[in-house]
Amino acid sequence: FAVDGAAQVGQSALASNVFVDGGFVFVGNNYYDATGPRLTSMTIDDGFETLLPPFANNNLYSGTITFEGTAVDASDFGCPTPACEAFTGINGYQISFDGGLTWDTMGRAVNPLFNNTHHGRVLPYDWTIPSRLDATTIPVKIRATDYAGNSQAFVYTVTVDTGAPRIVGTINVDSGPALGTHVDQLTLLDFSWAEPTDASGEVTMLGNFGQVSTNLAPEFVRPEPERLDAQITEGGEWYAVVGAEDEVGNIDWIWVGPWYAGQVKDPDAPSGLPWGSAIQSVNIDGLVDLEYNEYVVENEWLDTDPRGFTPLSLYNAWSAGESFIGVVGGNWETDGAFLVYYDLENGGTTTPISATGSITLPFAADYALTFNGTVATSWRFNGTDWEDDFSYLDYAVDENSQGLEIGRYFEDYWNLEEAANHRMVAYALADDGNLWATFPRNNDLGGVLAYYYDWNVTPGSGNGDLLKLPTYAQLSDLAMVVNSNPIGSAPLTHGSVVTLSVSLFNLSETAADDVLLDVTGSTAVTYQAATGASCVVCPPAGALQLSVAEIAAGDTAVVTITAQLDADLTGLDAVSTTIALASQSFNNEVSTIVHQLDLLPPQQRFDDVPGNAINGTIPRILGSSDDRAGIGLARVEYSQDQVSWATASGTNEWVIELPSQAGSTAEVYVRSIDLYGQTSGIISQTMVLDDIAPVITPTVPALVGGRGVAYLTGIASDPAPANAQVASVEIRFNNETTWQTANLGDADANGARRWVYVWQLPLDDGVSHTYQYRATDYAGNVFTSTVYTTVVDRVAPALTLDTDLSGLTVENDILTGTVADGREVSSLNIAIYAITGSGTVTNTAITPNPDGSWSYDLNLDAGMYTIVLNASDGLNGLRVIGPLLVEVDDVVITNTLNITATLQGRTSHDVTHSLSFYEAGNTNTAVYSTTAVADTAGTFTLTNLPAGTYTVTLTPPTGYLSAVEVVTMPASGTVSVNFGELKNGDANGDNAVNILDLSVLAGAYNTTSG
């Protein structure tokens, strides 16, 4: 079958499944069952009513629907042939919602009154309709099966609707404040949206605007399906929620918001709402949202103080019983603390909270709040001290915008209009306890606060007064810059005239009117004139008050004031002028210009020159002058007769160049004059003419090296005049043009000075360098020495070890190598250490050959050793090889000793011999002993004997004399030795044949064993 979009069904003829082998067999009958059961009825119950087919007409179903019906399995009565089919009975029912791909079992009940199982009932089957199907026709396939396996399927179509109408896009705000805006009065808004779509075609629009949940569907039917007119009527968060509902109750919705509403204004009531009903729309999240009017700049921005770490702005909004503080510009992790004090009732204290620095409040405060960078706290003065108020307090910091918001609730005031006072002062306090911002900002940062905000509320006025700016709020930003001529760092003197220039910059967006300047001078200051302003208190006077009528926004006004000091300033150190902005409409800036006084003449001195020596041909005298803390030097003058005066070169440091002098001495007089014409007293000095060069005695080393530097020393002296000294000693190397200065020590009793020059040595290997000295005395006479030569050797000898250390044996452990140096090799040594750490085995000097080669026989026993080679050139230039780990191996013995020894008087010589091996010169202790059995010819073989030269003693059985031979055994190879015929007759075994043997034989003569 197939179903089209209009629920029309096309179906083929019913097919019967015949199971020939699996069907029922009835004995005595020829009938068989080849036809499936038939559904005879089907109903749908959607929870409201029971419906008969067709189900797809105008009925829409949602939720759960129940299928129920009947079926029969019976012969086709009136069968045309005797072989009419039989029936086996209904076995079961299945239902499919996907065209027969999958099936679910339906309940079965059999009617026993009708041929047993031939007539059955389809029990109720509940189908939960899937969601999001929007007016969709579903073909439902139900089949019945008998016991013979025959089945028939029947199709029913139903139209379901579980999909809500779709609202495409968003809700548009056609008129009214933007989303997120804070409003404080009745506000109208218009919304629109796209027309929703639904497959059923039946749509009802719903919509709400108010303080509603966005998680709930709207309830109110909208007469206009695409528009919503709304208004904000009271404080709170407001949302617009729009939904669409189809005819079976499917609903979908969208929303937009919030708008933050306060309740402080009523445009139809000039006096405003009763203040006890006032609500603010401030959302305490740390973001002072000026773009969306969370604070109204016109009447809730109190000011911005630019004087601290960063410009800091303060906002305040009042509600019925709460103060909402907004601060912008502080990084409170580093910028300290922020404090606000309130005066709401009579009484209180001018002393701030003890932990907040040395501050004096401008009024008797009774409430406060503090924020220490982490936590906000509310405070109340209890008549004796500040205590934690535990009032409702909400606060938040927004790091991105550097915003801080604090809501401070006054639990004793349901209506703040009824408070006795409405005063506030606030400030920012650095970690060191110093102020860096104050509100109002006409307060000085020194700590004594004189100004505060006052709302001047008239009880019963409604919200009008608390919505106005308080006194000193939004002060005009009038910057004052004061300059003086002479500048403040320049000292003044008797009768000096000072011109003060006062520049007033209006940084505000409005004109600054009635600007007052208070000008106050210290003792001995009289103001002679003022221009650029009208005078309230006029010159000449020791204090002025000047008025500048108007400074337009962005303009600058300049006021010029002329002051003169008294003719006699004796006893004073400084004078000053203080200029203050005195108007209450502006920030009260104060500027003080202080001038130190120059009432003393300069002073001077000659440079100390040993012996007062000067050169007679080109006389030069040096000295210095000082005007103390004065205006500065104008010139330095000198004379040789105190009649004719000339000007020296320089002032603070000066040089006098006299003409060529005759005789032995020259008298010189010096005086200094400052820029105010004050002249010092005259000083004089007798200079001694010196034309004799100094002398030097250097210490010249023949050889330097070993370290990176060498110290060249010597003594320099100046023979004349008395007490004269050498001023400098210089050195140059290898005839270079550059002279380098040596370090001079203090002079001894005879005026001689020792010098030292630290020579940074080049990396040379026995290279000669030349150098010479130059000495200059204080009169400029020069002595240049002869040329000296010193050898520089900083390179250690070159040392090699050529032996392959991997093949050392006790017989072959000779080391070889080379050693060389650009100058000389003073020593070559080898140190050998046992691997066990028991100390040095040997530490031996090696004598190299003339060609630089060397060799050394280790002569070590087999084992592990550490060796270190070092070569020195005698200047701490040391070349080291090692430590090296070496192994000395035993020689592998593979030798053979063939021995022949015959016995006198015997034809068969197969006896056992004893052999002992002795090293040369030592016959007491054998290094090796063994026994061996000779063959009948008297021959036997020993193998793997220790290598070396030995004295070998062969001892035969008792009765024969032993024999001795010298044998040299190699590590490998064969050696043969013949001990010859061993004589018999040694009866007593003492290895000698003598009378003692005869006695033994005589005693045994003619005896037999046993």
Image (cartoon, rainbow, N blue to C red):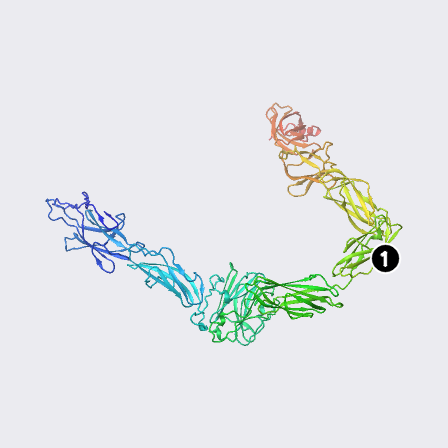
Q: Which quarter of the image is occupied by the C terminus? A: top right
Q: Residue 309's quadrant in the figure?
A: bottom right
Nearer to us in this view, 728 or 390: 728
Disc tally is 1
Residue 858 seen in render? no
Rendering coords of residue 616 (x, y %) = 86, 49
Rendering coords of residue 185 (x, y %) = 43, 67
Rendering coords of residue 952 (x, y %) = 66, 30
Q: Where 71 sits versus 912, above or below?
A: below
Residue 1005 seen in render? yes
Q: Residue furthest right?
A: 663
Nearer to us in this view, 413 or 273: 273
Q: Is residue 32 left or right of residue 103?
A: left
According to the picture, the residue beneath numbered tag 1 turns out to be 643
Q: Is residue 535 left or right of residue 568?
A: left
Secondary structure under tag 1 reads loop
Disc 1 marks a residue whose amino acid type is Val
Q: Is residue 54 left or right of residue 762?
A: left
Q: Residue 582's quadrant in the figure?
A: bottom right
Rendering coords of residue 146 (x, y %) = 19, 49
- State the residue at coordinates (72%, 34%): 848
Q: Residues within 10 Å of mark 1 (few under 14, many from 20)?
A: few
Q: Residue furthest top?
A: 907
